[in-house]
Image (cartoon, rainbow, N blue to C red):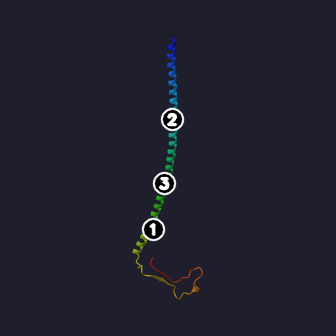
Amino acid sequence: MSDALEQSIVSLLEERVELAISTVQELRADKLELEAEIARLNSDLLQRDAQIQDIENRNSNLREELDAERAAVSDERSEIRERLEGLMDVLVASDESSVDINEEITFEAAPDESDADVSEDEPSVSPRIFGSV
């Protein structure tokens, strides 16, 4: 082979080697960029996972508070309902009663009974006035 042909082949091979080296360097730079992007995306993913967990925890706490509030409201309603039923029963009983609510009833001990007749086991009777309820 001639010297010119050998130099041509050598220069072509050198160009190919340089092209291969520059391609490898570009691929390494691209790889580093992609690894950095992957690391950033993983960091974002971890932050979002933490945010999601925080939101789920707050949601759970709010649900517990809501359930407790609903239970308190239900208890309060039941208590109010019971009071109203009691008041209604009193009103119904007072409507059915034949006693005039403005009339007072007085119970007194008979004048001929003496305090000496009352034993310690028996409570003493004193005048009492019963008015309307």
Q: What's the residue at 57%, 86% (across, down)?
A: 115
Kind of residue at badge 2: Glu
Question: Which is more toward the observer, 122 or 63?
Answer: 63
Of residue 36 and residue 132, the one placed in the foreground of this image is 36
| Residue depth check, mark 2 versus mark 3: number of the one nearer the observer | 2
Q: Nearer the viewer, residue 109 or 64?
A: 64
Label number found at residue 19 = none
- The residue depicted at 51 percent of the width and 49 percent of the height is 54
As measured in the structure, the alpha-carbon distance from the residue carrying label 2 to the one carrying label 3 is 43 Å
Residue annotated with mark 3: 62
Secondary structure of residue under mark 1: helix
Q: Would residue 21 be found to the left or right of residue 102 on screen?
A: right
How many labels sit on residues? 3
Question: Badge 2 is on which residue?
Answer: 33
Q: Residues within 10 Å of mark 1 (few under 14, many from 20)?
A: few
* Residue 123 coordinates in the image, percent (x, y): 56, 80
- Expressed as whole percent of the image width and height from the top left, the position of residue 33 reads 51, 35
Q: Which mark is residue 83?
A: 1
Q: Nearer the viewer, residue 42 or 13?
A: 13
